[in-house]
Amino acid sequence: MELKEYVRDVPDWPKKGIVFKDLTPLFKDPEAFRFALDSLHDRYREAPVDKVVGIEARGFIFAPTLAYMLGAGFVPVRKPKKLPWQTEQVTYELEYGTDTLEMHRDAIEPGENVLLIDDLLATGGTASAVVKLIERQGGNVTGIGFLVELGFLNGRSKLNGHDVYALIQY
Amino acid sequence: MELKEYVRDVPDWPKKGIVFKDLTPLFKDPEAFRFALDSLHDRYREAPVDKVVGIEARGFIFAPTLAYMLGAGFVPVRKPKKLPWQTEQVTYELEYGTDTLEMHRDAIEPGENVLLIDDLLATGGTASAVVKLIERQGGNVTGIGFLVELGFLNGRSKLNGHDVYALIQY
């Protein structure tokens, strides 16, 4: 199945000059949605995975289903003040300014094997920040999986030493 | 399995006097997470479902997995300016002020059977607004399912005439 047929290019979004890869046509098509999830599952079914981590908000669309399929737990990473209990924070650089993400302090036990799943690998800044959050809690990042990779932004260079995989390449 | 054992009460969050029902302990436990999803799936497996709709952000944690299990597509409802393409909007009343939600214009075809899944039924304002969005696109709401219902807030009264179900009752 050619998943790229279900990705919609939206020009000048979220700002002028950027062509956004809209995955909602893939999500709403039962066959494409199932094929994408089954393909990710095939990639990780032999891996030891205790927890799957997903990042707010688009990352929540795929990561929990992978957790279900792998028999793992799901851990949400959210923007500040969205998680109700005690959190660990990480702050990272953007093109202009910084961004902060949080995870609950009891989300991961030391030594657990953790799979990080997100929708898009662009510059790799968000994923590498979340890897820090996972490792600070003693988690072992066994894989980092994306639906889409924008290869020309070279985000993999920020994730050196990790097993990085993307279902759809641009 | 007693799912309430996996729900954490967080007092005075998001504001003083409110006891928040934190579901992250349920999400991170593989058995509880699987049991909750399998129970929702059992409830809807005989229903005709073309699309499952989930609401940003916590609603994304369960709804897409249900879509996968039921062989349906997934449709995200998001806050304004988060969806990249043409949207339909709905604005609804809160205790103080209003809130707005959006859905892509091509998300649902006329006559499709739609299951709405969200984490929490409180006053019912959000769910009844999303029902309007679905029906405006010609969708037929075949069920509205929640993980948790705060029965004392009587949110069901706003969803009259619909099949409403919640896995955990308070």
Image (cartoon, coloured by chain):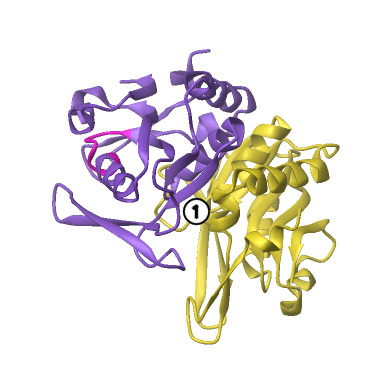
Chain colours: A yellow, B purple
Q: Nearer the viewer, residue B47 or B9?
A: B47
Q: Residue A97 colored magenta?
A: no
Tell me what residue is drawn at x 36 percent, y 23 percent.
Answer: B165
Position of residue A46 measured from the top left corner of the image (x, y, whole percent): 86, 37
Circle 1 is placed at which residue position? A78
Q: Secondary structure at mark 1?
A: loop
Query: Mark 1: which amino acid?
Result: Arg
| Residue ID at (45%, 33%) | B23
Residue range in magenta is B121-127
Residue A72 drawn at (x, y percent): 68, 33
Residue extending furthest left?
B96
Q: Residues within 10 Å of mark 1 (few under 14, many from 20)?
A: many
Question: In the rendered view, would you say A152 is above or below B141?
Answer: below
At x 51%, y 37%, the residue is: B62
Pick out the residue farthest to the front.
B111
Does the segment drawn in magenta span residue B125?
yes
Residue farthest toward the top in the current orientation of the protein: B1
Indicate the position of residue A168 as horizontal and vertical percent values: 74, 62
